[in-house]
Structure formats: C-alpha cells, structure tokens
Amino acid sequence: MYYRYKNKEVLKELKSEYPFLHNVNIYLTRHGESQGNVMQDKVINEQANILPEERIADYKLNLTLKGEKQAKILGKNINEIITKNNMDKEKILVLVSPYERTRKTFEIANEIIGFDFKKIFVLNSLREQSFGAFDFVSRKRKKSEYPREYSEYIRNDLHFFRQQYLGESPADVCDRLYQVLFFIKEYLEKNSIENIFIFGHGCANKCLIMDIFNLPPEFYDDFQMNTNCSIICIEKGIWRGIID
C-alpha cells in the first residue's frame, strides 16, 4: 500500500503483494443494465422518489432488455479473449455473485462461452454493497426524512467510510471481499487454474481491486465505476486496464 495516495494512475505501477495471484489472470466483469440501474438514474438525475410499490429487493433486481443484449455482447467478448489467448477452459475458474442480475448476466453470456459448470461457484461474499434505507432515495428526501442519519452519513469526507443507514459502507464491502481472495487462494492450492472470470458489481468490483492491490481509501472515491458488462483485466497480479 502507498502510505500517501497520489491518484489512480498508481495502478499502473503496482503489482499485487499476494504471490498466489502472480500465476493467474483475473477478469472482473459487471452485470448488464438492471432495473436498479434505471431506478437509480431516475433518483440521481431527476431527484425523483421511487414509490414503495416500485421497490424491488436488491437481490431480485433483474436485467432490462438492454442489459440482456449487453450480456450477449459480454459473452462474445469473453469468448474472443479466451480464443485470442488460447486459454484452456479446463483451467478456468468462474465466480458469480448470488444476485439475480449477475447470475442472469452470467447465464446469458455462458450460452455463448460454454464454461464448465464444475468450475463455477456462486459466492455470497461477492454481492453488491447494501445501501439499506438509503437505497433509491433522493438526496432531498434523505435530508428531510432522515436528517440525523444523513448528517452522520456525510460527516465522512470519503465515500469509502460513509455508512449507509441500515446498510454497508464500501469499507465493510472490502472487509468481506477478503473472503473471495481466501477462496481463490485455497482453490488454487488444490487445482490447476490459469484464468479466473468474476461476474460481479460496480461498487464490489472497486473494493475487490482495492483488496488485490492493497489500495488506501482515497482510491475508492477517485476510481470511476466500470460500465455495465465491461471487463477489468488484472494479469498475473498486474493492472492491465478496462475493456469496454
């Protein structure tokens, strides 16, 4: 970890301190556009409130038609990566978040890819950050209906430490995502794996990057979330960038 953080360009200079990641390539993907993405855009751009009858439990949020199309393109892109790099599918590990939008993204993409289901694991710790009572709530409504909780929330200058009311902070997500690294380490010790594809979420992906490279909290605020169905490549513990 850098004692003092400069900017996100530091990624280009780092190599993960975890030796077990030095012999594998990791491809972090984000699910396709979901019902939640559409509702959140409405809240942010229009400062509109989502009605109680419109709300859907986070784990049940599904893909939109656009998201399904993105998932098909993701499948083609991953297939191209596998072919271009002459990957042995017998040496590929696939990890998937338990949330519906992510599992659906994987299922649609896998119709094209054809991953071996014996090496596909749904890990609960890969789930997205919980926004609790603040999920799909406009800033105006937070201030008016949750004045004390919102005041405490914004007291932290860094979003990384901002605790969502009845939910998680990104710091909490980072803590639980170490379980994913532990799972990978244990699995690599017993299996011959060269490439790992992870189907996850925007905030969770940022936190996993922070865990892999031991990055300080300032990074979270500085690094823009990857777009739906883009691919983040970490090659043998070295940052290689985002494939949109």
Image: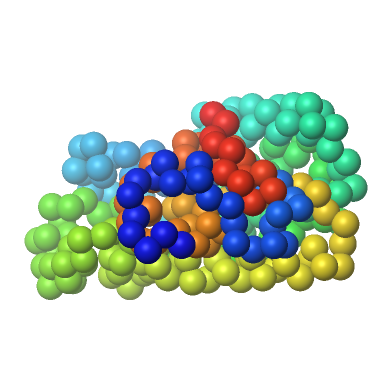
Front-most of residues 159 and 45: 159
Image vertical order of residue 28 relative to residue 108, above or below: below
Q: Quadrant of residue 83?
A: top right
- Residue drawn at point x = 86 percent, y = 49 percent: 91
Instruction: Answer left or right for 130 relative to 141.
Output: right
Residue 128 at least partly seen: no
Whole-percent x, y for residue 193 in the image: 83, 54
- The one nearer the camera, 124 or 89, is 89
Q: Residue at x 78, y 26 (%)?
A: 84
Q: Residue at x 82, y 68 (%)?
A: 189
Looking at the image, what colour scheme do you see? rainbow
Dividing the picture into quadrants, the one containing residue 154 is: bottom left
Q: Is residue 153 left or right of residue 231?
A: left
Residue 111: image location, x then y, percent: 77, 35
Q: Residue visible at 16% across and 67% down?
A: 155
Q: Count up the numbered dots.
A: 0
Pick whichever, 75 or 78, lies toward us: 78
Q: Is residue 177 visible?
A: yes
